[in-house]
Amino acid sequence: MEQENTRDKDFYWKLFKSTFLISTFTVGGGYVIVPLLKAKFVDEYHWLDDKETLTLVSVAQSAPGVVAVNAAIIMGYKMAGLRGAFCATFATVLPPLITLTIISYFYSFFASNHYMQIVLKGMQCGATALIIQVMYDLLKKQWSKKVAFPIMITLGTFIANYFFNFNMMYIVLVDALIGLFLLQDKKYE
């Protein structure tokens, strides 16, 4: 891949450092880390554009595995080939490995400490607020397009699962078929 050869060592250090720091200070899983990666790679460094990032995140969410790692692999590969994918993935996985190693050594302290439980509850609130902010930003960007039908599908999916306890696999299958039919109709693209 020619893009892989044109990247200098400074690029890989920036990629590693920014991904490592984001992974280190992000609590809440892949859905929280993705907007932070977007802010760094799209808004600050301009390595990717908005639409491209949204597409890559969609692929990362649909692939099996951890969303944060999938996003790191896909975005790293898009920016710098295999080296970029390896660099971003290693930087994403390393902080949780270090954290879990430390916690495992002091498990009894963390499990019984009242203050640690309060800190973790606060982190959950922060992660929830970040996810809501990302949802709001995405909805605001997409509002100019025709979104009434996709919103109805989302609400219908929620109602079918939450209130009527339909099997989620059947709901996903029905949503996929609806999406397939929508792709046939060019007005929803």
Image: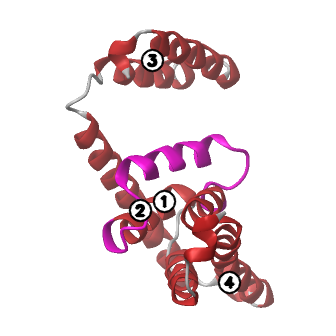
| Magenta-drawn stretch contains 46 | yes
Q: Give me the disc on residue 34.
A: 1
Identify which amino acid the numbered label 4 is placed on. Thr
Q: Give me the disc on residue 99.
A: 4
Q: Mark 2 points at which residue?
A: 38
Residue 83 position within the rendered picture, expressed as x and y whole percent measured from the top left: 69, 73
Answer few, some or many: residues within 10 Å of disc 3's Cα (few below 14, many 20 plus, some between 14 and 19): some
Q: Magenta residues: mostly which secondary structure?
A: helix
Magenta-tinted stretch: 43-69
Q: What element carries label 2?
A: helix
Q: In which quarter of the image is the C terminus?
A: top left
Identify which amino acid the numbered label 3 is placed on. Gly
Whether label 1 touches label 2, CB < 8 Å: yes
Q: Is residue 150 above or below residue 86?
A: above
Answer few, some or many: residues within 10 Å of disc 1's Cα (few below 14, many 20 plus, some between 14 and 19): many
Q: Quadrant of residue 104?
A: bottom right
State the separation of the CA atoms marked 1 and 2: 6 Å
State the separation of the CA atoms marked 4 and 2: 24 Å
Which of 65/183 is in front? Answer: 183
